[in-house]
């Protein structure tokens, strides 16, 4: 497995593959890989001639008070997971090369970046859109893979890819969960055993909402109230039912809509969501 | 000469050229081509296997009160100039395809975009950086060519290309002038004969400043005052001596610095600049 550390090296290698008529699937990650990432990498390897993953903890999507410094770095374990999933090259740029002195350029997806996670994390999606642009420009893939767990990020990346005309197909894959329902997240490592147990109220409440939908409930307020009640034991950031593309609030479920939650559990801020499809 | 109207068609054609190991030089324009553009296109044709130009009057770089609607469109003459300069393909996207409903993504080069022209035209460089990103993603060139007449735009594009890691070489070529010194601009068409004569005070004052430099003057204030005096017959927007990379004011010329002016002359807002090199 090849490890490329500069954009120039990555770009040259990628162009070589394209010239040889190889399709490239790309999975951008911040490392601390888990089965969610693995599912994306396996799909990238299966759906393309070549799978590339990036590992880069992106400072511009963390606010100063957030967990950039303590974000888990598990390089050796990450390499093993990538290799097992059929990834043939890892792009792992250095922070100083990605954001050199005088760095000044940011990509902003207006509107989509402002609600939900954008309220508590106002620079988050600007950082994500910017670094994904840079990664896309270095890796130049045919397809890029993201997890539905980050529903708002998926919407931002889809919009940005369309708007900036990257010509890259964005593939969104389902959230991967632990056996007890907890959505997999690199930040689950922050949880104590007690917090880990309390954190289950997120997925449990979302699954309850899915049952309400099956029982015929369609109005957002009933569903959101139910989920908020179910999450009483954690500090709720938001519970919202939104349109999957625009991330704007939905009052009544008429098409597939995203029920998204965020909560602080001990030192971790966790997010989760389910798609409520009325059909 | 090929005319491509969609990003997909442009991208496919460009990738075909790259696979055939052809280098691509790209000149983005808003049409209304003049000898300044022609000099860029000839350089692109000479310095690369293939030269591509784009013709697109970009609405997001015009404020509502500005001249988007009346900006000159001279399609047939433009094609002739492109062909004569050795351009083999023109990318001419439709406005609705470039900015479809729901469009939300903007590229912003912070700091560099705010002074000089950014004061009078606060959304201008955001629009430029955004559309150039989109054009780069569709055309995917090896080199892109811009004119020094738009000094601040050159700084913004250079910074953006570096920051977003496009892997594209930015080539800046000298301002092309009419025989009497007026910097060529598509907006010169807006000038009456009388305004055309008055507009000469911009280049005349800049040439005077070059003479001051040769005479040993190094302080910005003396030079800027001289130029302001020389431009008394037009409505000055700004006269500033700035660093060529950061566009920050320079008080004393110690390295090549840009003396940039902007003025309203009748219906036209004109810009011009010279590089003052103390060596």
Image (cartoon, coloured by chain):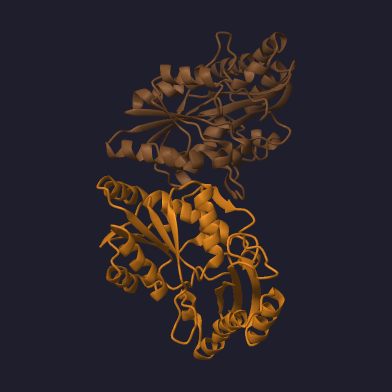
Chain colours: A orange, B brown
What residue sits 51% from the left and 50% below the top?
A162
- Is residue A64 found left or right of B235 in the rendered image? left
Residue A52 rendering spot, x and y as whole percentages: 33, 59
What residue sits 74% from the left and 33% below the top?
B65
Based on the displayed image, in which of its 4 quarters is residue A77 positioned?
bottom left
From this viewpoint, is residue B48 visible?
no
Please give the count of numbered marks on the rendered protein: 0
Please say if B73 is above or below A237.
above
What residue sits 70% from the left and 21% below the top?
B228
Residue A167 rendering spot, x and y as whole percentages: 44, 48
* Nearer to me, B256 or B196: B196
Please say if A1 is above or below B75.
below
What residue sits 56% from the left and 64% below the top?
A152
* Nearer to me, B4 or A198: B4
From this viewpoint, is residue A114 visible?
yes
* Nearer to me, A54 or A116: A116
- Is residue A177 found left or right of B114 in the rendered image? left
Quadrant including the N terminus of chain A: bottom left
Residue A151 rendering spot, x and y as whole percentages: 54, 67
């Amino acid at each position: 497995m090849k490890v490329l550390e500069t954009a120039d090296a990555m770009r040259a290698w990628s162009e070589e593959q394209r010239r040889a008529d190889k399709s490239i699937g790309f999975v951008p990650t911040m490392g601390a890989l888990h089965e969610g990432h693995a599912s994306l990498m396996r799909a990238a390897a299966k759906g393309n001639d070549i799978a590339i993953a990036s590992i880069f903890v992106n400072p511009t999507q963390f606010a100063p008070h957030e967990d950039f410094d303590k974000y888990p770095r598990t390089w050796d374990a990450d390499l093993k997971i990538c290799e097992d999933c059929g990834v043939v090259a890892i792009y792992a740029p250095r922070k100083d090369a990605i954001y050199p002195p005088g760095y000044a350029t940011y990509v902003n997806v207006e509107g989509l970046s402002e609600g939900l996670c954008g309220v508590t994390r106002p620079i988050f999606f600007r950082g994500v859109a910017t670094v994904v642009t840079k990664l896309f420009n270095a890796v130049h893939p045919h397809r890029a893979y993201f997890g539905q767990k980050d529903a708002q990020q998926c919407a931002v990346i889809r919009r940005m890819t369309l708007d900036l005309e990257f010509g890259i197909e964005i593939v969104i894959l389902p959230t991967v969960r632990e056996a007890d329902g907890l959505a997999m997240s690199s930040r689950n490592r922050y949880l104590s055993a007690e917090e880990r147990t309390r954190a289950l109220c997120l997925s449990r409440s979302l699954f309850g909402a899915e049952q309400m939908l099956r029982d015929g409930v369609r109005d957002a307020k009933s569903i959101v109230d139910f989920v908020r009640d179910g999450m009483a034991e954690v500090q709720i950031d938001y519970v919202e039912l939104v349109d999957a593309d625009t991330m704007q609030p939905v009052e009544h479920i008429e098409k597939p809509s995203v029920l998204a939650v965020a909560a602080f559990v001990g030192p971790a801020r966790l997010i989760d969501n389910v798609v409520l499809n009325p059909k």
